[in-house]
Amino acid sequence: MATKKALENEGTVITWSVFKTAFYQRFFPVSYRKDKGAEFANLRQGQLNIEEYVAKFTSLLKFAPHVAISDEAQADQFINGLNPDVFTLVNTGRPNTFADALNRAKGAEAGLLRQRRAQFVPLAAKLAQENPQIPPPLRFDDGSSGSGNKNFFKGKGKQFKRSGTSSSSSSSESKQLGAGQKSGDLYQVWRQTQH
């Protein structure tokens, strides 16, 4: 209310712009406004995604009134702070409004992410071919093919022994699951070792 009264006493028509200017002058020290203005002028996207960059941009915009008053100046400042790969895509046919620049930046970022994802899988496969010690990318069987894990233990030659027997026990006390046996035979092998 004090800001409003001070402005009314001066005979100033109170628009939102006038009120904001008076409010910032009163509650934000000059040194703070200068620091934030410099931070805005030097703002770069860096490691931020477009959403994070635009949030930082708009939060600092109020400290750069010379940019805030012009939509074209906002677009220019925003574009100039973008990372080079996004900048190149957005700057083609230079947008005149901040909203247009933002939409183009979001589209450019999404396109670049798709492109990087598409390059990642073939690169992993190529590296696996060039260096056999690097395993190829894993492919998971969700069981929908009907094969499931039926043959997981097939041919593994697992031995089952009675508990408490030493490794030198007789061959009659240990049974081996052969390559041709089904996993249902495991129970039979176990039962035989228990008697």
Image (spheres, rainbow, N blue to C red):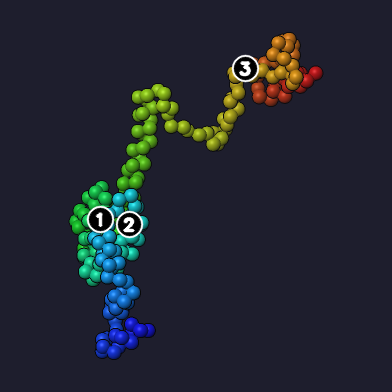
Q: Which mark is residue 3?
A: none
Q: Is residue 190 left or right of residue 103?
A: right
Identify residue type, mark 3. Answer: Gly
- In the rendering, at what x and y percent does residue 133 appear? 41, 23
- In the rendering, at what x and y percent does residue 157 appear? 62, 17
Question: Label 1 neighbourhood size at 10 Å, few (<14), some (14-19), many (20+)?
Answer: some
Q: Residue at x 35, y 33 (%)?
A: 123
Q: Residue at x 21, y 60 (%)?
A: 76
Q: Residue furthest left?
A: 93
Query: Does 159 appear above or below 99?
Result: above
Q: Residue at x 58, y 29 (%)?
A: 149
Name the residue tied to disc 2: 53
SS at circle 3: loop
Name the residue tied to disc 1: 81
Identify residue type, mark 1. Answer: Gly
- In the rendering, at what x and y percent does residue 23 appear? 32, 77
Q: Observer-nearest residue: 184 or 96?
A: 96
Query: Does 147 appear above or below 192?
Result: below
Give whichever of discs 3 and 1 has the lower sequence position. Answer: 1
- In the rendering, at what x and y percent does residue 96 appear? 21, 63
Q: Residue at x 29, y 78 (%)?
A: 22
SS at circle 2: helix
Q: CA distance from mark 3 to mark 1?
A: 64 Å
Q: CA distance from mark 2 to mark 1?
A: 9 Å
Name the residue tied to disc 3: 157
Question: Label 2 neighbourhood size at 10 Å, few (<14), some (14-19), many (20+)?
Answer: some
Where residue 175 sits, quadrant-wise, is top right
SS at circle 1: loop
Question: Label 3 neighbourhood size at 10 Å, few (<14), some (14-19), many (20+)?
Answer: few
Q: CA distance from mark 3 to mark 2?
A: 59 Å
